[in-house]
Amino acid sequence: MRLKYFGAVAALTLGAAACNSFLDVKPISELPREQALSGPTSARAAVAGIYDALQDGSYYGGDFVILTDVSSDDVDWTGTFTTFADAEDNNLRADNGSVRGIWNAMYTTVARANLVIAEIPSISGITTAEKNQLVGEAYFARALAFHDLVKTYGGRNPGDPGIPLPLAPAADASVGAQATRATVAQSYAQILTDLAAAEGKLDRSVTDPTRATLGAARALRARVLLFQKDYAGAEAAATVVEGMGYALAPNYSDLFSGDGQTTTEDIFRLVFNPADASSQGYYYLGRTENEPSAALAKAYQPSLNTTDLNNWNPQDLRAQNNIVVDPAGDYCGLEICGTKYPTTAGGEDIQVIRFAEVILTRAEAMARQGGSKLAGAVAEVNRIRVRAGLSALVFGVSLTTQQQVIDEVLLQRRLELAMEGHRWADLVRTGAVDNYLTAKGAPAFQALYPIPQREISVAPGLTQNPGYR
Amino acid sequence: MRRHLLSRSSVVGLIAAAFLAPAMAAAQGNASINGTVSDSASGRPIPAVQIVVVGTTRGGFSDEEGRFAIRGLAAGTLTVRAQRIGYRPETRSVTVAEGETGTATFNLSEVARILSEVVSVGYGTDTRASVSNAVTTVSGEQIAGIPVAGVDAALQGKAAGVQVTSNAGNPGNAITVRIRGAASLTASNQPLFVVDGIPLNNSSLSQLGLGGQDINGVSGLNPDEIESITVLKDAAAAAIYGSRGSNGVVMVTTKRGRNGTPRLNLDSYSGFQNVAKQWDLLNAKEYVMYRNEANTNDGDPRLFRYGRPGIDDTISTDWQKEIFRTAPINNTSIGATGGTDRIQYFVSGSYFNQTGVVIATGYQRASGRVNLDFAATRKLSLKTSINVSRENWARSENDNTIEGVVTNAIADQPNKPVRRLDGSYTGNELAYPNPVAIANLSSANSRSIRTLGNLEATYNFTPSLKLTGRAGADVGNLRDLRWESPNVEASYASSVSGVAQQGNNTFNRYVLEGFANYDVPWLSQRSQQLLLTAGASAEQNGREYDFLRGEGFASEGFRYPGSATRITVYDGGWTGNNLASFFGRANYSLLDRYLLTASVRTDGSSRFGVNNRWGTFPAVSIGWKLTEEPWFGGMLGQGNSLKLRGSVGTTGNQALPQDFGSLERFARKNYADVIGIGQVSLANPNLRWESTREYDGGFDLDLFGTRLTLIGDYYTKLTSNLLVNRPISATTGQTSELSNVGSIKNAGVEGQITTRNFVSDDPKGFTWTTDLNIAANRNKVVSLYNDEPFSGGLYSANRVEVGHPLGQFRMYRFLGVDPATGDAKYSDEQEFVGSPHPKYQGGFTNDMSWMGFDVHTFVQFNKGNQIFNAIRVFADDGGRYFDNKFKDVLRRWQKPGDITDQPRASRRGRSGALEISSRYLEDGSYVRIGDVTLGYTVPARFTRMSGLGSARLYASGHNLRTYTKYKGYTPDVNSAGSTANIGLGTDFYAYPVNRSFTFGVKAGF
């Protein structure tokens, strides 16, 4: 009996060994790394994967733009999702799912860029020139994501906690548990380092605005320096972009067409199509849960009576493109309809950086430097005004003080870039957010988005922004 | 590759041996055995006793006069066994010569029905009296005729320790079944269903996201075809299924043929169903008044849109009434059984048609079964068990959506009509798309065609050794087709001219297994018995799927994405896993008094990391029949018995939602039309089995001459190496990683009491049987990754934290409404405020019969759980959202000094009413009158006259009344569906469970 038993055990052991190959089932619909990153095509695909991350529904494809605009004074949320309703009320909590989604999507972008930066140099079959271009695109995307992170989640002073700065692919999950926040200053230093790397690698002759280009990296540098309040630097960077041949599109509406045509103004825009769609149009015109605020409408047309709305008749071409006011609610179901994104299917492209922003950056940088630069600042802002069908202003006549010039630049920035996800960061950057929150009866700490609670629970070294529990 | 083939051939060989064995078989004999079976007490003949000639393929059943005849036997000394539920089995030794007929007479003595039940133990059967681990049996009769689609739904309240939750009432919905509590965070908590030896593919099949409403494989089985169900509850019983035993095993045995003249059985019922209870919502006047008050309270001078009193509140629509209906249900099964002493057949066909109580929903199932038993030679028998089913679901979106039918019937404002004066559906003027329009214009259909079956060959080498080979398959296709009409105003579909979705899911499971059963002969002479079972099994699982979603249609008449202007979602791929297993079991008994069962299974699964692919799952159980001890004597009286049981075992769980979770993987991540790729998971080569160690102690007690039977169990089980998609820092590029972390403990008691209150020797006399089962389970999370708690479920209300039950509700505690301000007050921190797990639950069944009448009542009860009524987030929100409100808001705070539990109305949500808090929890305890059936068996003299063998007529009510404090449709709810592990006990616009009234007939020809 005992012998038989041993025999059975031996048979089982042998059989088990034979079964190991039966148990080696390989995935087909998804692939391991050695097959996924195996040559030139897959290397290029890995870079396209970074743009895919930027397109995410929580990032430029949706929530990052929508939620921050809803937090601001430009857009009201009329819908039912509590994560958005809390942004509307400036009553965010650390467990807000959309705030977490935005954070996750931004770091997914960073991780895909990190993989490209780490792996592509060793992939054979690609020319050095192309490798440089591909890696340069990754550096640009990382800088963009880091800046979007720090302006949303980071503190308002250079010494405040900024964001975690992962610079290499994570070998395993334990790496993430060690994450800590670099200071705001360190975060900005890394962004500028990445931009320098991108500028060093990106080929000037490549100008496709649907991907990262040298122009995009330089324009992002101007934006970043403006946020750092390095106005001379921002002006210089913007001037460099000016010299690259970009020009304002003749018609504002050309920038937001349903078919995504390229204009001379495009510096970096993300391509969407119905199968890889953005959700802006859907929220403004489909679900009609995003409603441009009466305050924004009034900013376009100061004569507007916001309790009546029947005298809507703006001269501003941007207002005509961006807003339809219909007190009866017949146009889209709301009184004020956001029409910047024309299709509910979300196939239109999303502008991330366009030349008008660079002009406004230059104008603001000059205005803030003051003195002899004020006239130049007005000249810059006039380029934006004239394209919008407004009259040119004359420094010393219609605008006399530095503050008036700054206010005009900020107003045009608001009107020009409305509903493109800039407003909230501008309010925070300029400090205007404090009055805005006070007027709404919301606490001042809401100026910073909370670090997602889930992130803190898995990486205990991360500190929460003040005020959030 | 070569080794690959070898491994399979070893299993194939085993089966081939079984099939080829007839060549070695001796020639057929022509000896016969006749005999009779009668009751030892009354002397009356007993029909339907199974007669088996041990060690051969021959056997039969006794007829109405208790007579049987078995032919074609080889001459010699034969052992004949007679067995029937309710009687103690007996054996006779008969010596017959070639061409002669021997005689065997049996006088069977009655035992408690429950102790004589045949239980399936996996790769063999046993009787209740001789098992030493925790199993429960439910007979086919107990679940037949209940007007529900699936076996799982019919099991509700029938077996102690088996918790069945309907989740929602949509016809054919996947049901949640938990045996002895939930133990997994990510892997499935559903038990393994084994149908005639083949593990059923019970994963979620539909690719349509319709809230918590899933489809799984259990509904394809026709409950009328089931002979019995054995639930293997403790680890010792389930360990023979090793890595899939952690959640318990439900062994389903289907009916088989009986020799004799063909018998035709007709089983048919039809009736109607309705919704027993509706949500109590505001009417138009109340709604308009309340919303305007919400504006006023916030200092907003304007009325809310569409909110002019006297103008906008003149029409009041009861949206719930508009979508609910009284709906028919019917079922017809026809079965034929018969055969010769060599071939027996059971053939059955059925059609079940349930129209949903919500308009435009329903479920149909047509199924057929062929079970054949063929004694090929004296030593070789073959059998098939084949089921083919076609199911059709007309579904509607509900739960977490703004375009659901039930959802919007609760949510839409009451002050708007269903249709405008011109007859068109309203929509743009509503807060949410018109639910009647959605139901009537849009559709969501799923259809499955499925074959589940096996071929089995058993070769009896000697009377004590038999070898069984089995090849089984569970293959099928589920097709989803959803149409979202462009004419549903204010819906997404209307903005893009229609949306169509089409998905196909083709799944297959192939199982090859072989095993030997050996009854060690030399021990049986020494008052001992040793049964050995050993075998191997190989299983291959695959799932191939495709999915398309298209937008933009020229006409309302289109349905398929092929007619779309643009394809917006496309998917297609394959996933699969293989499982290889070796198993063995020894059942030893000494003096029929001391019982020992030991089993072990070794499983290897492709799902796990290369470092941890194989797992071994041992178990041992002991039983001691005290009443068989000479010293025990007649302490309990004659014919009574007491058995003590104890067991320990280890089982596993590998039912991951993901086949390749241990690998770093990259998937398509295209940038519009540019080819793109991106990482979707990090690698975890150490990924391994979840394992459960369970201890069980219990007793089976039989008293007062089989009038009272008590079965009790206490168990404790610890599940460790939990498979968890644990959250990881997003800075890695991934937000979760599948890993083994943490442990969960379940402990509980179960009891089953069966009493025969009245028995009668006269078939027309009064009989009354009562069965009560009750179970209490306590669930506790013991450890987690770094012991860090996390939240899941809707609004992250369900907490997973060490020391607390899985998914316990953690929210702000509602402290009442401040009489001065009308604002809701809450605790400063979130607290544990309630549990989704019941403290205890069970079922209470009474069966009475007299003079051909029979009455069956079944009451189900459930006590101590909370339900997170998430509908309140919108329907009791202080007037923040457009949704209609529960009537509760009528007692809201309105002026300083008001004492109430309802915060003031506030359009901007400033009264604190919006906080996810214990204010939204409700008591989920209930007592439900599950079934009441009144039947009448037509006297034989009438049935004979009309050519019928037997006939019974019955009227039945199902879910007649539920006594509960819960205000919703049903407390038996979970909007997160059957696959939810953490998001438990939540009602978020679930489809109501119906109540039904049916009339049926059961006839034999």
Image: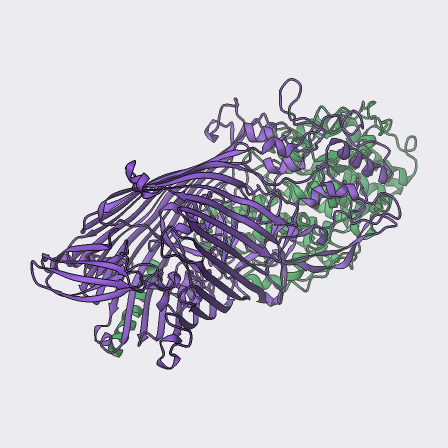
Chain identifier of the green chain: A
Picture mark count: 0
Q: Where is residue B296 in the image (x, y as percent from the top left)?
A: 85, 37
Residue that sits furthest to the bottom in the current view: B631
Name which quarter of the figure residue B477 lies in. top left
Please, is residue A460 above or below residue A247 in the view? below
Q: Quadrant of the C terminus of chain B?
A: top left
Image hue for chain B: purple
Q: Residue B735's x, y, as percent?
A: 59, 55
Q: Which residue is drawn at 23% across and 63% down?
A: B106
Query: Height in image: B267 above or below A198?
Result: above
Residue occupying the point 47% across, 69% down:
B694
**Residue B232 seen in the figure:** yes
The image shows residue B865, relative to residue B565, as above or below, that is: below
Q: In this view, does A40 lie to the left or right of B1?
A: right
Q: Quadrant of residue B605?
A: bottom left
Q: Is residue A265 rendered to the left or right of residue B30? A: right
Q: Residue B810's spot in the image, x, y percent? A: 67, 58
State the residue in front, B131 or A316.
Answer: B131
Residue at the outermost top position: B422
Q: Of A142 and B43, which appears nearest the observer?
A: B43
Residue at 75% x, 58% y is A469
Of B472 and B504, nearer the camera is B472
Q: Left or right: B510 with respect to A119?
A: left
Is residue B614 in view from this perspective? no
Q: Indicate the quadrant containing the N terminus of chain B: top left, top right, bottom left or bottom right.
A: bottom left
Which of the colour schemes (rainbow, by chain, secondary structure, one colour) is used?
Answer: by chain
Q: Nearer the viewer, residue B167 or A209?
A: B167
| Residue B82 in the image, given as x and y percentages of width and height | 25, 61
